[in-house]
Amino acid sequence: MVAEGDRVAIVLQDDPDPDAMSSAIALRALLGRNKLTTPIFAFKPVTRPENRTMMHLLEIAVSDPAPGELQNFDKIAMVDVEPPYFEDKLPRADIVIDHHPGYQTGLAAFEDIRVGYGATATIMTEYLLSAGEHISERLATALLYGIRSDTLALSRRVTEADIEAFTHLYPLANYNLLKLIDRPELPVSFAHVLARVMRRMEVRDGLVAIHLGPVERDDLIVQMADFCLQFEGVEMAAVSGKLDRKLAIAVRTHGIGRANAGETVKRLFGEIGSAGGHRNMAKAVIPLTAWRNREKTTRDKAIEARLRELFAAAMAGADETAAALARDGA
Ligand SMILES: [Mn+2]
């Protein structure tokens, strides 16, 4: 279908995920192309921190097409998505490889849609293996991560084919890179926040409670809670930050012993925001207006003191929690 001199564009869904990005570089390898002859496009950029880290570490370039730019390509391919998704934004669709159900089919000359597969990366792995194509460490790492993230580590919508592809890729992938992708890179500005905050950190009765103040990304709060849990004697870490007129609180425990993160946040914040989670990780998001109504203030210092008080009471027992909640609410 693709002639030697053809310019091919690979188009992905908005805010591409690891399955889409890995499938795109697999298709490029399968066609024997490089990023100049076969660029990857998306109308909206990658936003999730883990996905951005994957993109940087694996050097996957995804660009936003300029108006009319796609008209200049001889062939338009898409992976992990189908033509109706783009409405009238594409001049044509020639190659479509996907696993999503529910789209109108028959819109492209080459169509391979395997509904039921856990990931498009699985389909692409099968193509690479059938073609006897060399699968580089970079490509294997990307595809493995694509399958893993679309199937929630092989726990959701997974088929025999996904497991087989995963097994093929496993010995070829780079584990240090996978580990780095799982731990997204931090903005440099966060170093200053850390330097300020860590000076205040103390462990009291197994609890660390820290309020970061305004933060630029939600995942910084989560990473901070993970980090605090690593110190000796810590049974529970509660870290909050202000973001978009809300107070986000991430809670971590080791998942053993008396502390239960999910139950604790529900008890403490269920009435003024969304709160929930599991034994070892939980989250609460509270509009600052609701926090102010109950706690009377949204000053950063006061938030941290109150956080410590509430979580300490929750760890000590349910009756004390109720008392702590009632104390200032009254
Ligand atoms: Mn997918």
Image (cartoon, grey):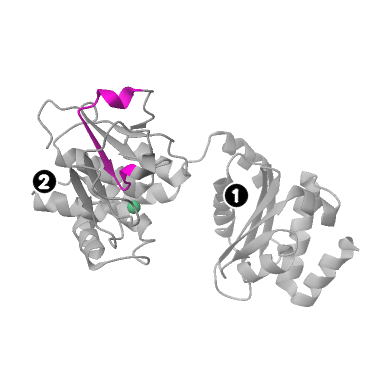
Q: Tell me: 316 left or right of 71.
A: right
Q: Which mark is residue 237?
A: none
| Three-letter residue code for mark 2 | Glu
Question: Which residue has dot 2 on it?
Answer: 133
Image-quadrant location for residue 153: bottom left
Residue at horizontal 57 percent and vertical 59 percent from the top: 229
Mark 1 belongs to which amino acid?
Ile
**What residue lies at 15% left-to-right and 38% top-to-bottom?**
31
Which residues lie in the magenta part? Answer: 68-83
| Residue 329 drawn in magenta | no
The answer to whether marks 1 and 2 mark residues whose Cβ atoms lie closer than 8 Å is no
Q: Is residue 33 shown to the viewer in this render?
A: yes
Q: Is mark 1 within 8 Å of ligand 1?
A: no
Viewer-side label of 1, 2: 2
Residue 74 % position (x, y): 20, 28
Q: Label 1 vs label 2: CA separation?
A: 42 Å
Which tag, 1 or 2, sits closer to the chain's start? Answer: 2
**Which residue: 17% across, 55% down?**
126
- Left or right of 64? Residue 325 is right
Q: Quadrant of residue 305?
A: bottom right
Label 2 C-beta lies within 8 Å of the nearest ligand 1 atom: no
Q: Is residue 184 visible?
A: no
Query: Could you say where residue 247 lies in the image, as x and y percent from the top left?
Result: 70, 50
Residue located beneath label 1 in the image = 221
Query: For the residue labelled by badge 1, is the local secondary structure a helix, a strand or a loop?
Result: helix
Q: Is residue 74 magenta?
A: yes
